[in-house]
Image (cartoon, rainbow, N blue to C red):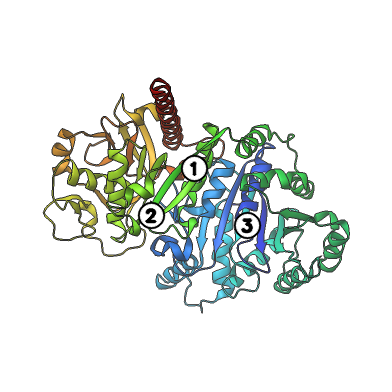
Amino acid sequence: MRLPRKTKFIFITGGVVSALGKGIIAASLGLLLKSRGLRVTIQKFDPYINVDPGTMNPYQHGEVYVTDDGAETDLDIGHYERFIDVSLSAKNSTTTGQIYNEVISKERRGEYLGVTVQIIPHITDEIKKRIKSVAVDQFENDIVITEVGGTVGDIESLPFLEGIRQFCLELGPNRTMIIHVTLVPYLEGSGELKTKPTQHSVMRLREIGLQPDIIICRSEKRLNQSIKDKIGLFCNVRPSAVLEGRDVSTIYEVPLLLEKEKLADLVIKRFRLKCKDPDLSKWSAFVKNIKNPKGNVTIGVCGKYTTLHDAYKSIIESFVHAGVENEVKVNIRWLESETITRENAGELLKDLHGLLVPGGFGDRGIEGKVNAIEYVRNNNIPFFGICLGLQCAVIEFARNVCNLQNANSREFHSKIKHNVIDLMPNQRSIADKGATMRLGTYPCVVKEDSLTHNAYNKIVIKERHRHRYEVNNDYKPILSERGMAFTGLSPDENLVEIIEVEDHPWFVGCQFHPELKSRATKAHPLFRDFVKAAKTYKEESNGLVQSFGKEVDSLTADTE
């Protein structure tokens, strides 16, 4: 594979503990370099043996992030896209399962000409091939950032680190760089920051043959110069390359923190890059608006994975983006769908300004979602349904407005009279679960003068999908007759992509996942307008309360 001469490669590893925020640091560095006019892409290496996270329970892995080309990937790909505002592809996400699957397939085809297939060189060669593959996309990238999942010392990540060692040796220090993210814990009892875990982490990395060029220290306290000097001395890194990665109030502040730490300047100096001065004014204004909202709204998210917020990571971030554009903070109230009944829905939802029902699979908690949707529809509370959320909205409407008793989805009941949601025809012969759904970007034709058209201001939109079930077209006439509008269809008009409910302030369901295309400084149109509707609902509700109060006061005065 031809490798562009100018492309430089940065590898980000982690030590001591997992969940240190390597993905946010990779995304932040990408943003800082892009703000200097460089072309940047980011790649993730995940050590698990699953080919992708598509068949994994959200409690195991968090959300599945889908790219334009239909790859089911790790949620860090979402962070990369939101920060650097670039649509990535399947090439930007690599798992151990993919590597071994490719090598074994080549062996079965006889491509190794009878030699013994081994981790070195065959597995590591495939890893190096994946690193090179992202250097050239639509154009040649100046910088490729590769985040290695897991923690140094894990057995699972050793082949990736060995592949990176070989790659760095082949290209040399002028084109490669290692950034190690580690933890510097603070012991409350002694009042000290402890550097020993970092020393041991770097020692494990060096045993593999990788010497970090920069160390980013995650800590809840500031690192004084003596701490930096000590880490630099024992880890063979210049003290100026030992940087703070303190906790901040929002992840979007991390790029600004790392800019103060001169992370991008260290990279530019190392690679001798010529680039313009950074322009972070728009990002700084965005962060300022996050931290200084003029108001707030409360939106309920009703799902079955609400105890693990990472299962809805892109939705959370989309609310941040939409909140900024509406000058409000979106407070999310997590609603466990299994607990919602028709009897308690009013008590649980009465003070919400909007309700979102996200995607999901399986019948657990479905009736609770239907009950919640019935309440907000009847009470004119803004509603947004995504994927399964749209399907639940159709089920609720069919039962309670169209009087189709026990209407449901074929996914939940194989033998039902009114299967208003059914398996897509091209899915009926598919047995495998992994990467077999309707995945990736598809076009949708939007009806004019609809809420959706008002949001996008476009007739044709393109959005990302991940589903097997769709609205049953046999029921479109009765649903439409009773007030459900099908405002978004596939170009051939065979698939319902968007539904709205007439005579409701804001009730929208979409079969696609708009949260996957929301960007930090560019909120998704549907999320933006949903939050706007919630804001309006709150203002009008408060106005009604105040007006009622004045009426009571005047009546009391007349009586007296």
Number of other residues with Cα within 10 Å of mark 3, as a class: few under 14, some 14 to 19, many 20 or more: some
Outermost residue toward the top? 558
Residue 209, placed above or below residue 34: below
Outermost residue toward the front? 560
- Which residue sits at x=29%, y=54%? 341
Indicate the secondary structure of the residue bearing disc 1: helix
The residue that disc 1 covers is 318
Percent of width and height locating residue 339: 34, 58
The residue that disc 2 covers is 303
Percent of width and height locating residue 427: 24, 55
Number of other residues with Cα within 10 Å of mark 1, as a class: few under 14, some 14 to 19, many 20 or more: many
Which of the pair 321/72 is nearer the observer? 321
Residue 64, placed above or below residue 325: below
Q: Quadrant of residue 295?
A: top right
Percent of width and height locating residue 118: 54, 77
- Which residue sits at x=68%, y=32%? 281
For the residues labelled 1 and 2, say whether their Cβ atoms are less than 8 Å apart: no
Which of the pair 390/506 is nearer the observer? 506
Q: Quick one: label 3 or label 2, which is nearer the N terminus?
A: 3
Percent of width and height locating residue 304: 38, 58
> Could you tell me how far apart the alpha carbons at marks 3 and 2 are, in whole angstroms?
26 Å
Q: Quick one: label 1 or label 3, which is nearer the N terminus?
A: 3
User: What amino acid is found at the position of numbered circle 2 in the picture?
Assistant: Gly
User: What amino acid is found at the position of numbered circle 1 in the picture?
Assistant: Ser
Q: Quick one: label 1 or label 2, which is nearer the N terminus?
A: 2
- Which residue sits at x=65%, y=74%? 153
Number of other residues with Cα within 10 Å of mark 2, as a class: few under 14, some 14 to 19, many 20 or more: many
The residue that disc 3 covers is 21
Q: Can residue 502 be seen?
A: yes
Residue 194, placed above or below residue 36: below
User: What amino acid is found at the position of numbered circle 3 in the picture?
Assistant: Gly
Outermost residue toward the left? 417
